[in-house]
Amino acid sequence: MADIEVRFRPVVEADLAMFRRFAVEPGLIGLDWVGYKDPGAVSRRFATDSYLSAEDGRLMVEAGPDFDAAGLVSWRVVGYGVAKGWEIGIALLPEWRGRGIGWRAQAMLCDYLFEHTPAQRIQAGTHPENLAEQRSLEKAGFRLEGVIRAAEWRAGRWRDGHLYSRLRDDPSPL
């Protein structure tokens, strides 16, 4: 299977419908569903900074020959002491999953953040049962650091998480 071309672009108003779907459609974002969210928050945030601030951001993932909107990548500041880094995430629409887009988008986001910010560390978390995302993160150059016990409340109970990281000096897989 040939690689599907992937690129980023800033969020535009037309993308907000997808963001609203993520807020109100159970299961659309898989295991990351944690209940209904305010769909109006999407427009309010877009009006504030178009999802690009110094503390966090989102970019649209476009894929395929027509560069259709396949989902989004996100990042937010995390820190240890005085050191600041990023925690990234990805949400792809179901029809774009399993096609090699996720690992490339996550690797591209790391390269982008390392190029445009002084961060030394980028981390990403996933669920122990999400084997596809674990493979995606590893392919994107991340290393498993360990299990975070009782990291999130999901589906009525506390659940563990897996923490991965990529450092500035780690080679890019792209």
Image (cartoon, grey):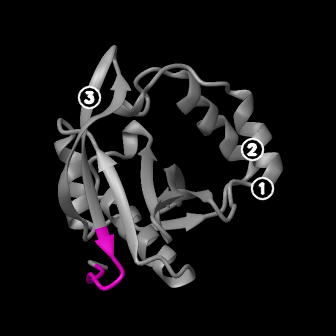
| x then y, percent, for residue 135 | 18, 55
x and y, in percent, of residue 171 in the image: 26, 83
Q: What amino acid does circle 2 point to? A: Arg
Q: State how far apart marks 2 and 3 are (Cα).
A: 29 Å
Provide the residue span drawn in magenta: 166-172
- Quarter of the image holding residue 166? bottom left
Residue at x 29%, y 24% (from the top left corner): 158
In this view, the residue farthest toward the right is: 47
Front residue of 2 and 93: 93
Say what amino acid the circle numbered 3 marks: Arg
Disc 3: which residue: 159
Looking at the image, which residue sits at the far top?
156
**Amino acid, disc 1:** Asp
Residue 45, disc: 2
Nearer to the camera, 61 or 120: 120
Q: State which tag comes first along the sequence, 3 or 1.
A: 1
Can you identify the residue that label 1 sits on?
Answer: 49
* Residue at disc 3, secondary structure: strand
- Is residue 159 a member of the stretch shown in magenta? no
Q: Is residue 168 magenta?
A: yes
Q: Is residue 68 above or below residue 81?
A: above
Give yes or no for contact between labels 3 and 1 (Cβ–Cβ under 8 Å).
Answer: no
Q: Residue at x 21, y 65 (%)?
A: 139
Contact, CB < 8 Å: mark 2 with mark 1? yes
Spatial separation of the CA atoms under disc 2 and disc 1 = 7 Å
